[in-house]
Image (cartoon, coloured by chain):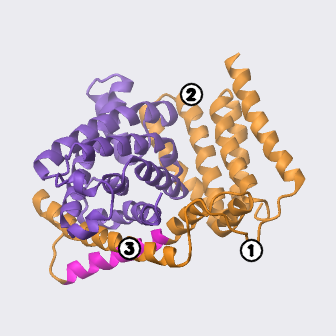
């Protein structure tokens, strides 16, 4: 599925949980969970199936503690479908391809920038947060002890991160302005992913299946 | 939307997710996952706040898919923060903390039906355990679910509001003035 168009990957990942929640449990849940877990297996044991099972497992435990067996099975299968679909999506979807696909489809450059910039900013700021934690510890900050002590430590750790992040906004805005990024502008994609007719039809088919399932359940 | 506000959104989303390192270090039962949404709203208004909230949920969902249905909570948080900023409730901690507690109640009320209907109240380990405690105390299923959400949201949102207030006051006045709502939020405009 890696070669599939990013919109197709998104459509598949959205359809499976939608069907799991719409169609009657547990039969539909078993089918959708099996399909979703099958998809994760295509990404390999370490990147796909194993993370999906590990993420879903605590839900089963807590469902078992809070509900009867029938409810546990129904909700557990739905959650497993959702978890496995998203784990597969996270492993299969290449953000750069998604941005190119959005631009090719005529989305504004602002929307494309938001996705690309967010995905690149998250690891950067996470690393910075970790450096701040280590630096403050070196300066003698003790993050344990009484609640008051911990709250003080939290402030000492969070404030530098938030203020430096806001300082970044100025630099980023300047960089974007000098590169001529005007909100609402359109640009030409360099390597737009192929979007065969068959995949477009398949996406519409998935939408129809979801709508059909909803109507069937409501009528 | 200006280029500055466009640049603010990814940074605000990333801070919400990066703050987990600080929370882990102090080992407090907090999420702080709405910090970026509240900060972006207090600086730039509801459109930027809602965009930040939706993107935060989307990026968080790639790590833990159960975050996505709670995107509604992020939108409610952004709208509430906008009203709080317009009313100048970020002017000091005496006004910000009660506003944060208020948001905690609203967030719990908003998240309870989602948690109950979609996940059977098992969204995270902490909430599931407090829900189990609520059940053990004799609360009905929905009441126990609200109890779990309330315990996690009440303090979390108050701390988040206090943190955002501290940041807004620590910003140099010239920097704050570059954002449309910042000075009003701290009650100086």
Residue at (67, 49) in percent of width and height: A13
User: In the rendering, what colour is chain A?
Assistant: orange
Q: Is residue B17 visible?
A: yes
Number of numbered discs present?
3
Q: Secondary structure at mark 1?
A: loop
Check residue A190 in the rendering and tell me which mark sits there, or answer none.
1
Query: The residue marked by circle 3 belongs to what chain?
Result: A
Q: Nearer the viewer, residue B73 or A2?
A: B73
Residue at (79, 65) in percent of width and height: A3
Q: Provide the residue span drawn in magenta.
A: A121-138
Return the disc, 1 or 3, that comes first in the chain's sequence: 3
From the viewer's perspective, tell me whether residue B64 is left or right of residue A219: left
From the viewer's perspective, tell me whether residue B36 is left or right of residue B177: right
The nearer-to-camera label among 2 and 3 is: 3
In the rendered image, which residue does mark 3 sit on?
A: A170
Q: Residues within 10 Å of mark 2 (few under 14, many from 20)?
A: few
Instruction: Find residue A58 and report its horizontal and vertical position in percent.
Output: 47, 48
Instruction: Find residue B26 and report its horizontal and vertical position in percent.
Output: 23, 64
Check residue B61 in the rendering and tell me which mark sits there, or answer none.
none
- The chain letter corresponding to purple is B
The nearer-to-camera label among 1 and 2 is: 1
């Amino acid at each position: 599925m890696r070669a599939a168009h990013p919109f197709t990957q998104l459509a598949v990942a959205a359809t499976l949980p939608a069907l799991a929640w719409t169609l009657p449990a547990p039969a539909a849940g078993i089918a959708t969970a099996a399909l979703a877990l099958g998809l994760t297996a295509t990404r390999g044991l370490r990147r796909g199936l194993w993370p999906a099972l590990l993420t879903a497992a605590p839900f089963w435990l807590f469902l078992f503690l809070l509900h009867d067996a029938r409810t546990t099975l129904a909700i557990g299968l739905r959650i497993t479908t959702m978890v496995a679909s998203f784990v597969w999506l996270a492993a299969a979807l290449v953000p750069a391809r998604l941005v190119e696909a959005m631009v090719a489809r005529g989305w504004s450059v602002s929307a494309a920038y938001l996705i690309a910039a967010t995905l690149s900013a998250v690891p950067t700021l996470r690393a910075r947060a970790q450096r701040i934690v280590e630096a403050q510890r070196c300066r003698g900050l003790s993050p344990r002890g009484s609640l008051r002590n911990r709250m003080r430590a939290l402030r000492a750790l969070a404030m530098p991160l938030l203020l430096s992040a806001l300082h970044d906004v100025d630099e980023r805005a300047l960089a974007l302005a000098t590169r001529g990024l005007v909100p609402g502008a359109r640009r030409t994609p360099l390597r737009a992913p192929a979007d065969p007719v068959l995949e477009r039809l398949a996406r519409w088919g998935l939408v129809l299946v979801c709508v059909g399932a909803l109507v069937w359940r409501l009528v | 939307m200006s280029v500055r506000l466009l640049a603010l959104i990814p940074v605000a989303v990333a801070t919400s997710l990066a703050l987990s390192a600080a929370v882990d270090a102090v080992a407090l039962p907090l999420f702080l996952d709405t910090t970026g949404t509240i900060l972006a709203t207090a600086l730039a208004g509801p459109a930027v706040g809602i965009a930040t909230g939706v993107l935060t949920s989307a990026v968080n969902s790639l790590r833990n898919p159960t975050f996505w249905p709670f995107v509604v909570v992020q939108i409610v948080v952004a709208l509430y923060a906008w009203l709080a900023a317009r009313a100048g409730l970020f002017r000091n901690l005496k006004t910000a903390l009660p506003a944060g507690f208020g948001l905690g109640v609203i967030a719990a009320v908003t998240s309870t039906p989602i948690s109950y209907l979609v996940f059977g109240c098992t969204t995270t380990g902490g909430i599931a355990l407090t829900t189990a405690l609520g059940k053990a105390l004799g609360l009905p299923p929905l009441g126990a679910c609200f109890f779990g959400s309330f315990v996690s949201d009440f303090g979390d949102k108050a701390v988040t509001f206090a943190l955002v207030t501290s940041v807004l006051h620590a910003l140099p006045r010239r920097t704050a003035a570059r954002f449309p709502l910042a000075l009003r939020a701290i009650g100086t405009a």
